[in-house]
Amino acid sequence: MLIVLFFVQYIQKNLNTKEAYPRWNQWLGYARLFAILLLSLSYSISDDILPASLVTWLWHAFMLAFVGVIYTREEFKSVRSLMLSVIPLIIIGVLGDFFELVAPNLYKKFDDYFDMFKLFAIIWVVAMWYQNKRQQKQLAAERLQRLEEEKQNKLMQARKAELEVLVAERTEEITRQKEELITALEHLKTTQTQLVQSEKMASLGELTAGIAHEIQNPLNFVNNFAEVNSELIEELKEEQEKETPDKELIEEILNDLADNMQKMVHHGKRADSIVKGMLMHSRSGSGEKESVDVNALADEYMRLAYHGLRAKDKSFNAALEKDFQTEVLMARITPQDFGRVLLNIFNNAFYAVMQRKQKEGEGYRPTVWLRSTLQNNWVEIRIKDNGTGIPESVRAKIFEPFFTTKPTGQGTGLGLSLSYEIIHAGHNGTLAVESEKGSFTEFIIRIPQGLPN
């Protein structure tokens, strides 16, 4: 009875027959009641009414029927192995009762063996139940694991689908941003070209102002000597019309005319060189390097920058100090680009001393120094001013594009950045700055001389 009650409870719980198989759940309930009824009959009814052997054989029939139904039905497939564990116990019970009925003496002789076999059968049932329980736990764990894996797979599939949507959206967004960046880059390149051209035109404007002021001197000389020569020619004509011309006077006038003409030619060539310098600076050039006298080029741009500032402010004056190691210092450079660098630095130097002059007044003497040396085939040019100086916080940024300390409208912020690029990339040199606020600023240009051996 205990086996029946246990198996009924076990099957109902593990197979959830109440919900999965309600009909079988009802029959299992009947089996439980029948087992209780048989147990009651074996203890409550006397042998005269119902022999004990008949009750025993009813138990055997019931157990065989119970196990047979459970084993043969597909619904109970998962508990078949546990049902088989009861068969040895049933067989031992049936054989024992059979021999007790037909051969009592033989049964009594082997009674202890039957009891031992029953004990082993019971142990076998317990062992099989324990093993089955372990298997059920393992199967349950595996089932839970599979369910968890299926759950995770579903989550992963859902996440994958979500990620695919996100990737598609992100790809579309990146593609759109890429197109926007390409468009922005094109606009930036166009703007950069315009700004660079604007910087070139600004430096050209500074140069033009200096040239206009510088060229006045030779033109004034040419005009003055032309007027003097006109007067001398009139005087010569008058002397020649006399009956007795003064030959010494005529010779003196002719000598003066020759001297004046030489001076006119000299100042005319000076004006011509200034114009050529302006044209050289204004055109883009081929970018090819030439052997150029760096001292002469630096001296020229120093004066042009100075006179360019004086063209704006007639009251401005500054001392120009030059210290050249040698009178002529040749180097292979790109004249147009290198001249642009010099002009930018000189413009900044004169701007700095002019600003300090406006603050300190007559007690301050604006000065700009130009110094050149040759060391181990490296040309070094130092341009120093005693202007306002550059604060340390600003010094690290002065070569960055679009950075300027000048008021709005007075600087593009490209002059020094372009100069840095020209010296570093165009001439394989270095451009550095040393400064002390309120005291001085000195730019140091170093480039290889680059002359053939």
Image (cartoon, rainbow, N blue to C red):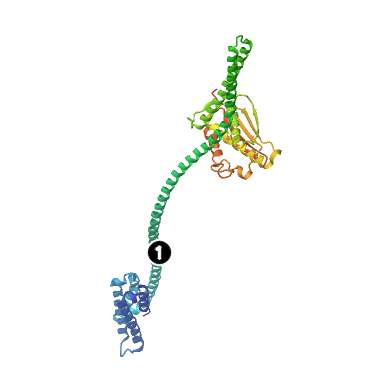
- How far across and how far down the image is residue 336, in percent? 52, 31
Q: Is residue 97 visible?
A: no
Task: Give the residue at mark 1.
Answer: 148
Q: Residue at x 63, y 39 (%)?
A: 352
Q: Is residue 374 above or below residue 344?
A: above
User: Taking 198 as reference, is 375 left or right?
Assistant: right
Task: State the residue in front, 165 or 371.
Answer: 371
Residue 283 % position (x, y): 49, 31
The C terminus appears in which quarter of the rendering? top right
Amino acid residing under circle 1: Glu
Q: Position of residue 182 (x, y in %)?
A: 42, 45
Check disc 1: other Cα within 10 Å, few if <14, some if 14-19, many if 20+.
few
> Residue lying furthest top in this view?
244
Q: Residue 244: x percent and y percent?
A: 61, 9
- The residue located at (28%, 72%) in the rendering is 73
- In the image, 141: left or right of 446? left
Locate the N terminus by quadrant: bottom left
Between 342 and 219, the one nearer to me in the picture: 219
